[in-house]
Image (cartoon, grey):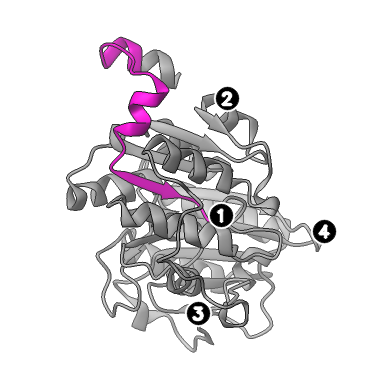
Amino acid sequence: MRSLSKMLFGGRRRSAGERLLNTKLIACDLDGTLLNRDEIIGTATVLLIRKIESLGIPFILITRRHHQAVEPYAEQLRMSQPIISLDGGITRLLHSDSTLATIEFDQEFALDIIDEVLQTTGAECSVITPDRFLFSRPDLLLPSYYLHWNIETEVATGFDDVRGSILEIVVTGGYYPINTILNYVESKMGEGELKLRMYESHTHSDLWYLEVRSAQATKQIALERLLPRYGATMDQVIGIGDHYNDLEFCERSGYVVAVKNAVRELREMADFITSHASDDEGVNEFLEHFLKARGVDPHDTPELQAEPEGRRKRSR
């Protein structure tokens, strides 16, 4: 348990107020947390985040989306901080041609998995790299959240040219072909080498998916590697999230915020739970609370201007 481990190994457990004031960085999830029902960052939220950053507190986006799908939101926030995307697989600055960090798995093994998929009847694959989303066929059906990324895609005539940059493989097909690939990968992988997730399509009952990526590609690991840039440690981080992929980095953060719609496990570890869901911009409750704790009026922002509604870009 989060609180028990910190009491046992961290000496006296600091109060929530002390931990709030000890903050050097805020790491916030995007979907289901920062985005409202229109899947944008609301004007009030933008102003509050800019106010927090004006105090010298970096605000980091940490998300399952691909980097390219996060850039419109980072632009809206005028963000100069690195973005942690693809669940920790990519750490990159806005509009940068190079990444600060990528977490890939053995590329020979990745190519072997792709070959196995392409030789298996009833299975197709897509490959995610830092800059591209490659499909084995143009009409490939993918989970909706991948399609909503709105990033550059192309049909691959071959996958050898992505050697050294494969971050994730998504296998698509029927239940038995997907199981065949799963068994192949499990028989070849080393202990703790890969993270595998097999699940059924919500929209097509005869369609299944298998996601394959490095076990090291987590939000927690990517965030820990980024913290020296700010001279911060995890107990000086505020973690804000809603879903299971946020549990690890939030559990290790000094202060945890859960939106109302968060999974039970995250709400149970939270120091602050919003009374409104992300759809209703519930995250603003905490952002205002944080500013007040720092002695700042959250509504006194005359020097900060929000982007006009018409200039917002949607990635979903």
Please name the residue that numbered disc 3 is placed on: 134
* Upstream in sequence: badge 2 or badge 4: 4
Q: What residue type is labelled 2?
A: Glu
Q: Which amino acid does label 4 sit on?
A: Ser
Number of the label disc, if any, that sits on residue 34 = 1
Q: Which amino acid does label 3 sit on?
A: Leu
Residue depicted at 36% across the width and 38% down the height:
294
Q: Which amino acid does label 1 sit on?
A: Leu
In the image: residue 45, left or right of residue 68: right
Residue depicted at 37% across the width and 41% down the height:
192
Marks 1 and 2, how far apart at CA: 20 Å
Please name the residue that numbered disc 4 is placed on: 205
Give the mark toward the camera: 1 or 4: 1
At label 1, counting other C-alpha atoms closer than 10 Å, the crowd grade (few under 14, some 14-19, many 20 or more) is: many
Number of the label disc, if any, that sits on residue 268 = 2
* Upstream in sequence: badge 1 or badge 4: 1
